[in-house]
Image (cartoon, grey):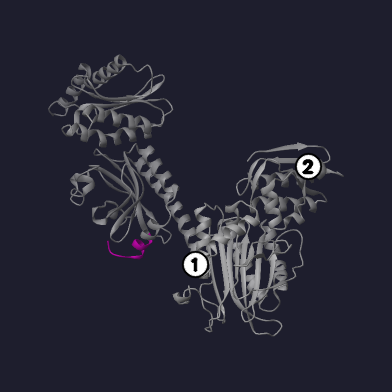
Amino acid sequence: MDFEETDEGTHVVLAPEGKFNLVAAPPIKARIDDLVAAGKDHLVVDLHAVDFIDSSGLGALIGGLKAARQQGGDLRIAAAGDQVRAVLKLTNLDRILAPYATVEEAADGW
Amino acid sequence: MTYVSRLDEVMKSVVLEVDGALGCAVADLRSGALLGVAHNVPYFTQEYLEAVAAAAVEMFRGQTVRHVEDLISAKRGRPSERLIEEMQMTTRHTIHFMMVLPNHPEAVLVLITNRETSLGMGWSAARRSVLSIEPILDGPEE
Amino acid sequence: MPPSTARQEAEAIAHSVPAERYDRVVRLAQAIFGAPIAALNLIGTDSQWTVASIGFPQGETPVEDSVCRVTVQHDEIFEVPDLREDDRFAKIPAVTGPPRARFYAGVPVRGQSGQNVGALCILDLVPRALGRQQREMLADLGALLEHELSVQEEMDLAGQVQQLMLPTSAPDIEGVEIAGRVQPAREAGGDYFDWFLVDDPEGGGKLLQVVLGDVMGKGLAAALIASEVRAVLRGHSRYTDVGDAVARASTTTRHDLEANGRFSTLWVGRLDPAGGALEYVDAGHGLAIIASERGYRRLAQDYLPLGTPIEDTWTRASDVLAEDELLVVVSDGVFDVLDDSFEQVEAKLHSILEPGLSCRQIVDRIVTFAVSHEATDDVTAVVVKRVADARPGATSEDTPTATG
């Protein structure tokens, strides 16, 4: 899966597209790990173009969140669609990955 | 289906099967006549196809070629035999896979592909098509 | 062919789900040798099974008409320059009739057991011989195929192990009927269910604990983690209440889940069949309902799955399973198929939960429904019902059809 990456200075925005699943999750997780290792530990994942997420996608986000927090940063998600929000709600993972409406709101304060 | 159209159907299936195939034909080595043909190239006119069939006949049964076969047979102390079974020809833009049908030595199959085709796949398909062609040449028309 | 473990192994492989990976090797053989016919044949006791081929029909032929049956008796390539000249093969249908093969070369292929289960072979319509390089290439392809076969056998075995670990027999307790089923997306997967008896920590006697777990991901990796979660939860469940058991299981498995970057949802219930008192913990699962003619209610909580960065404090909730109610727990493989809100899920389940069906029948209906709607994930369902039957531990298999 392709994803766009934008460095906004105070944070980096990753915008994956399409299905955030078993195949798409590892490269995104790997990119998050690389960014965090390079000191870019304030991350926003813009999900507006993601039409489907499964447990592997969730795992990548959770894993990324943990890596970012360990370095004193954070990972937030923005613009999640209906299916993504439904899955987050079902698993209660919206408690740790609160879905922000926009990238700006997610990055607020950074 | 007539004999000719059944052969045409087999030729069509070979062209569809082989990646990069341009055309396929069976020709009579005695007369140069086209027995069956299929192609997907606009400039393969009847005149062109007949010329290709004639060239194939020339390659397998031309005088100079026969002469070489006769010399070899003589050296081996055997009566004159037609020895050439298959030929592959590469041109600037094409590959020709040509083979005499094992159980019908009067007929030759010519498969023409572009240069991107796998040699092994081309030969595999050409040799396999024999399974469908020979029964048509064997039996009387239905 | 004399029956033997090798022949049985071959038949097992022939009947398992065929993989495109066999087709790939056969296509390579075709291109490398320019062979009109290439095939992978498995040799059973009475039949040869052609499981992948070009130019030769797939399926079953009598083993006495096969050439590969001789190949499996060797440990190196078996070549016949002209089948017509060999008394063993001159009269077999493939030589006397279509495809009228003349040349054969086959390399024996071993299964996991190390014994020859079949052969990768090429055939030609004219007499032929392979040179040394070509024989080496055929041997290389045989080795590739052996690797594919062994990977497949290993996965099938993992799947069997997983299925055998699921409970099938009725729990030894009166007044309850239970059934469960997992349909993994691959041979093995991250979904599992479990049931077993525990002593009521408050001294009330035996309770039935029902578990449905869903480890993130699919396949063997998820299955390995699922095995661990299952075992750990079983261990902790014996000594404490259901909330504490989940909390302890989370602590024990935390390291392994995090190291593997996976989380696991869990739904754990404890039922007292006598009065229907039900305690449960929902760790991020959310797909358990109590259903009856009177409606549905969801048994969900806000807790996180195991393996997330936050350690939750799982506190049990309570409900009561009435005698005319069903407890239905499913994995999200069922939910995914529906692609709808939970309210619409309930509506669809209504058509599945007909009164009078046994738990086994309902479980099968749920799984069939998900699979027929092309579920791509593992699919699991567990259904529990209280029964007035005085016999201990009825499963649907034992229930007389008169009550069905």
The region drawn magenta spans: C1-9
Query: With A87 as the anchor, is B18 left or right in this view?
Result: left
Host chain of mark 2: A
Three-letter amino acid code at the position of disc 1: Gln
Against A50, is C251 above or below? below
Question: x and y percent of residue C62 in the render?
Answer: 26, 55
- Numbered label tally: 2
- Confirm whether residue C115 shows in the render: no
Secondary structure at badge 1 equals helix
C222 vs C86, left or right, is right
Q: Quadrant of residue B142?
A: top left
The chain under label 1 reads C
Give the residue pinned by disc 1: C361
| C52, above or below C162, in the image | above
**Residue located at (66% from left, 40% from top):** A17
Q: Are marks 2 and 1 on the same chain?
A: no
| Location of mark 2 (residue) | A102
Measuring from the top left, give residue C21's x and y in whole percent: 45, 47
Q: Give the percent coordinates (x, y) of residue C219.
A: 55, 56
Q: Is residue C181 visible?
A: yes
Task: Name the residue located 83 percent from the left edge and 38 percent from the top edge.
Answer: A9
Q: Is residue C6 one of those drawn in magenta? A: yes
Vertical arrangement, residue B135 with respect to residue A95, above or below: above
- The amino acid marked with disc number 2 is Thr
Relative height, residue A92 to residue A81 (above, below): below
| The image quarter in which residue A96 lies | bottom right
The x, y position of residue C116, in whole percent, is 36, 57
**Nearest-to-viewer mark from 2 and 1:** 1
User: Is label 2 in contact with label 1 (beta carbons under 8 Å)?
Assistant: no
* A86 with respect to C6 (left or right): right
Please tell me how crowded label 2 is: few (under 14), some (14-19), or many (20+) other residues with Cα within 10 Å: some
